[in-house]
Amino acid sequence: MPAGALTSQRWRENSPVTFSPSNRPSIGYDGVVTSTHALGSAAGAEVLAAGGNAIDAAVAALFALSVVEPMKMGIFGAGFMNVRLSHGDQFVIDNYSQAPAAATMDMFTPLSDEWPNYMRARGDLNQTGVLASGVPGALKAWCEVQEAHGRMSLAEVMRPAIGYADLGFRATKHHCKFVSDTQDQMQSFSATSSIFMPNGRVPQPGDLVIQRDLASTLKRIAIEGADYLHDGELGETIVRYSQSQGGILTMADLRNYELRRTDPVKGEYRGFTITGPPPAAAGGLHLLEFLNILALRDVRGMGFGRSATIHLMAEAMQLVFADRNRYLADPVFYEIPDDRLLSEFHARELLSQILPNAVLPELATPALAESDSTSHVTTADKDGNIVSATQTINHIFGSKVVVPGTGVLLDNTMANFDPHPNLANSVEPMKRVASSMAPVIAYRGHRPAFALGLPGGLRIWPSVAQAIVNIADHGMTPQEAIEAPRMFTQGQSLELEKEFGTTTASSLRGIGHKVEMVNNVAGGMNIIEFGDDGSLAGSSCWRSDGGAVAVSRGLARDGVGLTVVEPVVD
């Protein structure tokens, strides 16, 4: 493992690591790519090996993931990118979806005012079909950040993705399960089922998944860039099809979409500076609000995985979710009291409500829902460029709609708007959707310490927070930190991964928690650690088909291969 404070500090006497990580870090000196699919990581590493930087690698990985994880993300998707450039500049690109200009606050009819159906609309129109699609920002973000800060051409970084689409890739069990879980909905859309259920059946692990229409689309994007979608033939094809099916998307929506480049939200925790995306993402504001509460307690002394520690985190999580569900929205449309939410006074105010042996009553704020079908990429190079990017089409296979002849899956990010009117996150024309994404870069002083992120919907920022606590409080290595058992609640029930054990669950039930044992909380996290010796260690966890690929290039010295004849001197 690389040298550095993170991997050498272990407080085993207070926080025993009782599990064995499934994966091992990959260590390199020129660059590392980690992602939620090994082929995504391989695509990024190929670009690094060819002389690209971390931005080139991230965009290559994202395009590749749009092919090999089509159920989770794509060019008609959305997300957030947290970027650090080699000279130290830091910025976030908000490329999340927004509602079309023709959207209205009452376009969906809510099914219920109560959890668990609070976010559902009549006919599932906000989840399935063309009305469920927001205006995308993914392709625009990838192309613009690569052009501004990459070293290679767009065609070069897209080459691996085009190959995966044209020649195919082998389906994993993970891929096949997602198809199986959505086959009934998918069969309602012939262009979708013909690609992902060829011959009318769910693929088996090892089957070749070929997307030739998507390959043709990607080849045109490699030439024309994002304009092919936002002001060109692809956009016109998608709009024409959407409107023929009752959709409201227009070419003006695509042309008028603008990326938001902003400063990251920053906060301190145990000597680390944590940076994440600003609202309408929760992964900066509410992640830091949660950590501010924990900073007031001796979490290290309480120990990892103990019932008292889990209780503290669960109660703090519920209180922060009450703020998140009440306030988080597009800041252009809704004023968010971020200074107050991040104040020490507010942290102390929330902590004062947490009792050691009693559970808070369920809070009155609505329980929201987001899909956990998302992808994440983390890249870094030897020059100090870093990208942490989370991207999605929202639910599994998005709206389930592939536009015929394009291979492009439309997102269903409209499902993340609150279908109830007159609330912070209600539908409004050209309004951004709120998100729980948390692509994070952490620093010690001015030096990068680690960068991480994961898929998982509402569970994203709580899972990132737990990984940070595992490193900063419990002395875990990054590999241990992302594979450690997780918990989650927003107030209804307390989800515990099974590795916490029945004794811990019984103890928590004893003080009033409604414990639900689950196989996994959120998806596959990946992380890159920056060693003091210049090494880069990339890790991925067992909760997805993720992988980490490190690059250490060995270029020949000048003069190698030349034959030099020395004169003989008597």
Image (tube, grey):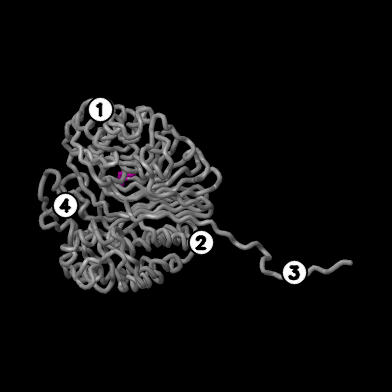
Q: Which residue is mark 4?
A: 105
The CA distance from mark 3 to mark 2 is 30 Å
Total marks in image: 4
Q: Is residue 145 left or right of residue 374?
A: right
- At mark 1, the secondary structure is loop
Q: Residue at x 17, y 56 (%)?
A: 126
Quadrant of the rendered image containing residue 235? bottom left
Q: Position of residue 345 (x, y in %)?
A: 32, 28
Identify the mark nearer the N-term, 4 or 2.
2
How busy is the neighbourhood of tag 2: few (under 14 within 10 Å), some, or many (20 plus)? some
Q: Position of residue 365 (x, y in %)?
A: 18, 38
Amino acid type indicated by mark 4: Met
Amino acid type indicated by mark 1: Ile
Image: 304 above or below 94: above
Q: Which residue is mark 2?
A: 49
Res. 564 mark: 3
Image: 159 above or below 306: below
- At mark 4, the secondary structure is loop
Q: Which residues are magenta?
A: 279-283
Magenta: main secondary structure equals: loop
Q: Which residue is mark 1?
A: 354
- At mark 3, the secondary structure is loop
Identify the mark nearer the N-term, 2 or 1.
2
- Mark in the foreground, 4 or 2: 2
Image: 567 above or below 431: below
